[in-house]
Image (tube, helix red, strand yellow):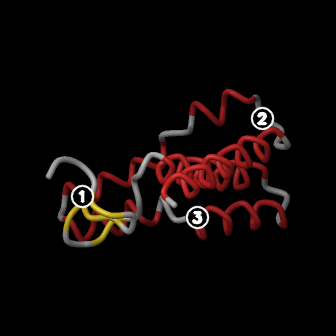
Amino acid sequence: MKTVLRIEEGLMLAFAVYLNSLLPYKGWVFWALFLTPDIGFIGYAFNARTGAFTYNLLHHKGVAIALYLTGAFMSLPLLQLSGVVLFGHSSFDRMIGYGLKFQDSFHNTHLGPIGRK
């Protein structure tokens, strides 16, 4: 099952790249912004609860889809780009095993524990 989920996430990343190709930006812009959602790690400088909130906010696919659709309905390509980057990045993270964080520890995710035991 784990392999099937990774393939699914990889296909969602490919879909994000496709959606990006429909936007009026050069293809490299998507990849230049690809790691920007990881700015959510800053919350961990305060504590695990704040870190989990900020990380999850910038790695939640629902937020990404809402941004993209809002941009589409309001004809705001920059908002669409933001949604596509968040969606693609989140898919990539899940593909390699990083999930949304629980409040107790960065290493405790909805996909199971990460890192060394």
Horizontal and vertical percent for residue 70? 75, 67
Horizontal and vertical percent for residue 40? 38, 54
At x 48% / y 57%, what residue is drawn? 2
The label number, if any, that marks residue 107 in the structure image: 1
Residue under pointer 2: 25
Whether tag 1 and tag 2 are in contact, CB under 8 A, the answer is no
Label 1: which secondary element: strand
Q: Name the residue type under label 1.
A: His
Q: Name the residue type under label 2.
A: Tyr
Horizontal and vertical percent for residue 75? 85, 58
At x 28% / y 59%, what residue is drawn? 43
Give the mark, 3 or 2, whose residue is nearer the N terminus. 2
Label 3: which secondary element: helix
Give the mark, 3 or 1, whose residue is nearer the N terminus. 3
Q: Judge whether 89 appears above or below 52 on screen.
A: above
Q: Quadrant of residue 100?
A: bottom left
Whether tag 3 and tag 1 are in contact, CB under 8 A, the answer is no
Q: In which quarter of the image is residue 5?
A: bottom right
Label 2: which secondary element: loop
Residue under pointer 3: 61
Q: From the viewer's perspective, is 86 left or right of 84?
A: left
At x 62% / y 46%, what residue is drawn? 10
Question: What whole-number distance in Å separates the C-alpha atoms at marks 3 and 1?
Answer: 20 Å
Horizontal and vertical percent for residue 69? 76, 66
Q: Which residue is nearer to you in this view: 26 or 112?
A: 112
Q: Which residue is nearer to you in this view: 3 or 15?
A: 3
Q: From the viewer's perspective, is 87 left or right of 111?
A: right
Furthest residue toward front? 1
